[in-house]
Image (cartoon, rainbow, N blue to C red):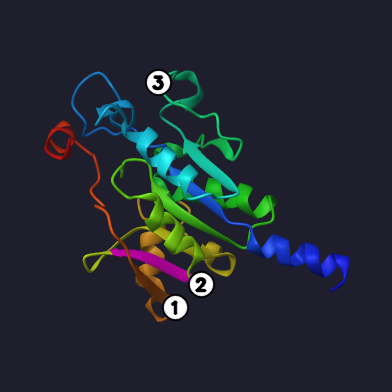
């Protein structure tokens, strides 16, 4: 095998993750943002970060917006794989945040990404890893038959992501059901949107 072919193979084997963490979290009552709220001993977002780091992605892009994540010392961001990507247009909805992540992933040479949400602390590393390593251009985790993030998206589908609005990967699942593969996963895909959610699942 020639050297350039080896490099291409290595490039194809690299795996990137995008954690969407840019929203205002307006449904969460109180003075703190929901992503920084303590859940089972550490911030909601920290659970997601730790699970994704444990899944051994080569690059992890955390999309910030309403919060400047680097200003919050309660978060541990030491992993060399982590890059904070600030979406200045976060108010336009989740789609703009996903596009921000896809842009840098494309620049870094990735042909697919695995996308999940910063407010889903009970999705384990095994789910992230299983979806990322699954074959297929559009792959979603399935928890007890329910399709939920994380979702793997091949580069050829990135242009179908809306420019704005609160539908990102979900829009692809609806637009291209012919390409969709499901990976059964263990874990709980609950979103922590309100203080009641926090209390219920703690």
Mark 2 lies on a secondary structure that is: loop
> For the N terminus, which image quadrant?
bottom right
Where's residue 28, x and y in %?
21, 31
Upstream in the sequence, badge 1 or badge 3? 3
**Left or right: 113, with 67 as reference point:** right
Q: Residue at x 51, y 34 (%)?
A: 88
Q: Residue at x 54, y 43 (%)?
A: 61
Q: Residues within 10 Å of mark 2 (few under 14, many from 20)?
A: some
Label count reads 3
**Is 141 within the magenta?**
yes
In the displayed structure, would residue 158 be above or below residue 43?
below
**Is 116 within the magenta?**
no
Q: Residues within 10 Å of mark 1 (few under 14, many from 20)?
A: few
Of residues 55 and 151, the one drawn nearer to the viewer in this rendering: 55
Q: CA gap, disc 3 to disc 2?
A: 36 Å
Query: Mark 3 or mark 2, which is nearer to you?
Result: 3
Of residues 92 and 181, the one drawn nearer to the viewer in this rendering: 181
Residue matched to label 3: 74
In the displayed structure, would residue 111 be above or below residue 69?
below
Where's residue 10, x and y in %?
71, 61
Q: Residue at x 61, y 36 (%)?
A: 80
Task: Identify the mark at residue 137; answer none if there is no mark.
Answer: 2
In the displayed structure, would residue 135 be above or below residue 196?
below
Q: Residue at x 40, y 75 (%)?
A: 180
Residue range in magenta is 138-142
Where's residue 40, x and y in %?
24, 31
Residue matched to label 1: 179
Question: Quadrant of residue 171 in the image?
Answer: bottom left
Mark 3 lies on a secondary structure that is: loop
């Amino acid at each position: 095998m020639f050297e350039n072919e080896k490099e291409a193979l290595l490039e194809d084997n690299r795996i990137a993750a995008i954690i969407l963490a840019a929203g205002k979290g307006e449904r969460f009552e109180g003075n703190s943002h929901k992503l920084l709220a303590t859940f089972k001993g550490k911030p909601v977002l920290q659970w997601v970060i730790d699970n994704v780091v444990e899944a051994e992605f080569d690059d992890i892009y955390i999309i910030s917006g309403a919060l400047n994540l680097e200003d919050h010392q309660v978060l541990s961001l030491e992993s060399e794989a982590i890059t904070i990507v600030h979406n200045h247009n976060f108010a336009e909805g989740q789609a703009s945040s996903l596009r921000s992540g896809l842009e840098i992933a494309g620049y870094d040479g990735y042909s697919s990404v695995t996308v999940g949400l910063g407010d889903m602390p009970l999705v384990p590393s095994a789910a992230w890893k299983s979806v990322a390593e699954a074959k297929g251009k559009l792959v979603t985790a399935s928890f007890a038959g329910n399709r939920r993030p994380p979702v793997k998206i091949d580069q050829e589908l990135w242009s179908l992501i809306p420019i704005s609005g609160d539908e990102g990967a979900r829009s692809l699942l609806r637009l291209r059901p012919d390409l969709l593969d499901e990976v059964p996963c263990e874990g709980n895909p609950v979103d922590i949107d309100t203080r009641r959610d926090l209390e219920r699942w703690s």
